[in-house]
Image (cartoon, rainbow, N blue to C red):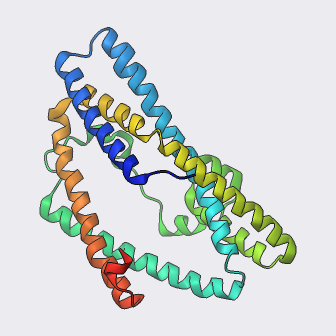
């Protein structure tokens, strides 16, 4: 399935800008009465929530099938150990670099200063699981339950384990692996199909947010938004460039 990704990106940006303008206009002129009932909490709310559900429903099958395919493609379980160790070390290293950049930027800029945390609701003060609980939680007791709840760590663990089983299962494993390759192609096409609705989903989500909160309540988020973008750019230009240049021995210009 061929999609012009550049054109889609432009359409998403247009949808976001149109949503901001529409939401501010609705907020300024008032959202009481039928406008609030049928437009803001009606059409916009329904369209936005449907778009979010279309995105979230794909996460589990996309991650599971792609990881099974990637693991089974190694064809040698001994290679999986070496690649797995390097992958874990790379993941931990890049994560540590990203967290360090984020903490330094947050301390310097303080994007949350003056922002009312009450809107965060249940997320404020939530207790994080201990390291012991996290390690135990890696192994699923019921993979169907983990998939239903969207608990990604057990899903990843089971996907890698299942891929390893395909590698050592000979001809039977190759036949099932071929089915997963076909399923992966179908899921990717499904992702592209859903992304075609992204401009409309983004418009609905942004318009409803601005209609309810207004420009004054949204402006404090701008500081946080641009800080995130700046740190992401810094991480890509700094950490990833050094990894490509000194780790992979590839020209960063060629890589990007």
Image x and y of residue 41, in percent: 38, 21
- Farthest top residue? 33
Q: Is residue 244 left or right of residue 133?
A: left
Residue 20 lies, in percent from the top left, at 24, 34
Residue at image coords 24%, 70%: 234
| Residue at (30, 30) in percent of width and height | 207
On screen, residue 103 versus residue 208, left or right, reads: left
Quadrant assignment, res 21? top left
- Residue 172: quadrant of the picture: bottom right
Q: Where the C terminus falls, by quadrant? A: bottom left
Q: Is residue 166 above or below residue 193?
A: below
Residue 32 appears anywhere in the view: yes
Task: Please tell me whether residue 243 is drawn above or below residue 32 in the rendered image.
Answer: below
The answer to whether any part of residue 150 appears in the image is no
Tell me: 45 left or right of 55.
left
**At 71% from the left edge and 85% from the top edge, which residue is drawn?**
76
x, y (%) of residue 127? Answer: 41, 54
Q: Position of residue 5 (x, y in %)?
A: 42, 53
The answer to whether 122 appears left or right of 154 in the picture is left
């Amino acid at each position: 399935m061929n999609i012009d990704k550049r054109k889609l990106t432009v359409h998403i940006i247009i949808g976001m800008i149109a949503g901001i303008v529409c939401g501010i206009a609705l907020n300024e002129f008032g959202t009481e009465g039928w406008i609030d009932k049928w437009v803001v909490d009606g059409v916009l709310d329904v369209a936005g929530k449907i778009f979010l559900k279309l995105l979230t429903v794909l996460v589990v099958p996309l991650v599971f099938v792609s990881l099974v395919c990637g693991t089974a493609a190694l064809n040698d379980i001994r290679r999986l150990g070496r690649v797995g160790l390097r992958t874990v070390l790379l993941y931990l290293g890049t994560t540590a670099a990203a967290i360090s950049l984020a903490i330094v930027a947050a301390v310097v800029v303080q994007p949350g200063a003056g922002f009312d945390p009450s809107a965060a609701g249940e997320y404020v003060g939530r207790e994080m699981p201990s390291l012991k609980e996290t390690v135990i939680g890696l192994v699923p007791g019921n993979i169907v339950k983990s998939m239903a709840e969207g608990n990604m760590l057990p899903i990843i663990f089971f996907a890698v384990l299942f891929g390893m089983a395909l590698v050592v299962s000979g001809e039977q494993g190759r036949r099932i692996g071929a089915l997963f390759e076909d399923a992966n192609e179908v899921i990717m096409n499904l992702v592209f199909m859903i992304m075609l609705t992204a401009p409309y989903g983004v418009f609905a989500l942004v318009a409803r947010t601005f209609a309810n909160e207004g420009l004054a309540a949204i402006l404090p988020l701008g500081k946080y938004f641009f800080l995130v973008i700046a740190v992401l750019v810094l991480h890509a230009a700094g950490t990833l460039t050094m990894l490509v240049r000194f780790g992979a021995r590839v020209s960063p210009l060629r890589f990007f």
